[in-house]
Image (tube, helix red, strand yellow):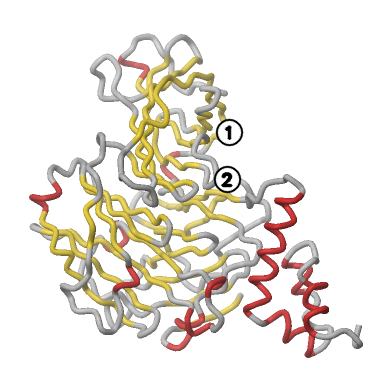
Amino acid sequence: MEDLDDDMLTQILVRLPNCKTVLACTPVNKRWCSLISDLNFSVLFTNHKKKTLKLNHEGNELSWTFFTTIVQRSDWYNIIKPITYFIWELPKLSLEFIPCKNFTVTATFKDLVLCTSHVTDQVGGQLYYITNPFTKQWVALPPCPVDDDKTQEMPSALICQSTYYNHTRDNFKFRVVLVVQSPATFDLVVYCSEIGEWKQINLGISKELVGPVVAEPEIVVCNGIIYLKTGLCLIALDPFDVNDTCDATTLKARVMPSLPCFGILLESSGQLFILHTPQRYDIVGLWYDEVGRAVELSMVVWRLDPNQAPLVWETAFQGLCKGTLSSLKFPRTTIFDSIIYPENIVVHPYNDKLIYMYLMPEEEFVLCDLRTGCITPLKSLRYYYLSKFHRLEHQWWPTSVPASAMLHCRKGVA
């Protein structure tokens, strides 16, 4: 092996089955450790996996999961300990290594997780953590300057510039974006990794332009752009336009085509989706139990590809999904007794035809397959323990906690 040059040895190492096997080779000697630690190695490793799977016609989809924070309480107001519950535990994951014991997951990006502490910092302000549950790395950001008791409930997003397009760790930038609602406008609080500071940004978009807001704003990351949904208005902005030279009023926000209806904003395979479940029989509830254990859902899905012109919302699905639940906790005798609400809706990251949702009050998580129109029960979960569900994608090479943040923040590896 010592007779091989660095390029040949690298080509051998990138053909190992997974990153865990590769990292097990780093203690062999300093040369192997240096080759594997180079950022270009992660690029070569990922590209080789994609190319190999494509040649073998196996597809290039990665494994993924979605999870929620289950809060154990001694009573309704006393929080004991949050537990991260993963729907699929392959591999087995946990967030218990974070130094803060009382936290809430507010956003994810690929395999990175953004958490906020339930306890404010001594100098004031909310504490945020960025962590990778696969590598157990974490970094604590400076306290958020927003003076608001509902910071944990603010719509938030985490977005990173991919390391695969950079050759130095200093170029690995990331942003944490919080949406702040004032009486007249929607403003942002953005954390810039290069300078290690929070910046307050005025979008200059009034609520009169947005129109009626029937629910809290939603925020989605798609193709490196952040999309903010408020009512029937959709706003697109590039968070990396916020930097050390950015003035409070210089951020350019683009108003996208109006939404076709009130619904839930989702992202899959680099496209945006609006999911709407129409009412039935003028009942507020969206779901109803037809006969016995049978349920059906009327659903409409619209699609928008941000990379194609003209930008037009197109109907991707319209019809009924039917199935049976594994158990019914409440008797169904009339239409008014049969109201079942879908909550915590998650879409497959690579297949927009697979939609997961939690049913209330049945306390059951189900899969809606739009290709077959079938509803399949997955798991039963107790509702009062659950918070919002988040999607987590397993990368070929784990995303490191942004190194540029290490210059300004506390870091660690459990």
- Percent position of residue 43, x then y: 64, 71
Q: Is 273 positioned to the left or the right of 390 in the image? A: left
Q: Nearer the viewer, residue 270 or 80?
A: 270
CA separation in Å, label 1 and label 2: 9 Å
Q: Which quadrant of the rendered structure holds the C terminus?
A: bottom right
Query: Can you give x and y, in whole percent of width and height, for residue 221 in the image?
Result: 39, 56
- Which circle marks residue 173 in the picture? none
Identify the element where label 1 is drawn: strand
Q: In this view, does 111 lie above or below 99?
A: above
Query: Residue 262 location, x and y as percent?
Result: 25, 36
- Position of the N terminus, as image quadrant, is bottom right
Q: Nearer the viewer, residue 193 or 80?
A: 193
Name which of mark 1 and mark 2 comes first in the sequence: 2
Say whether marks 1 and 2 touch (CB < 8 Å).
yes
Q: Which residue is drawn at 52% across and 50% down?
A: 67
Name above or below for residue 375 compared with residue 310. Answer: above
Give the x, y percent position of residue 110: 52, 59
Q: Along the horizontal axis of the image, is 284 left or right of 307? A: left
Residue located farthest toward the front when viewing the structure as drawn: 309
Q: How crowded is mark 1: few (under 14 residues within 10 Å), some or many (20 or more)?
A: some
Query: For the residue marked with disc 1, what is the amino acid?
Result: Leu
Give the SS element for disc 2.
loop
- The number of numbered discs placed on residues in the rendered structure image is 2
Q: Name the residue under label 2.
A: 87
**The quadrant where residue 32 appears:** bottom right
The kind of residue on which mark 2 rests is Ile
Q: Which residue is drawn at 46% across and 36% down?
A: 357
Can you identify the residue that label 1 sits on? 378
Q: Name which residue lies at 15% across and 72% down.
A: 249
Q: Residue at x 23, y 61 (%)?
A: 253
Q: Residues within 10 Å of mark 2 (few under 14, many from 20)?
A: some
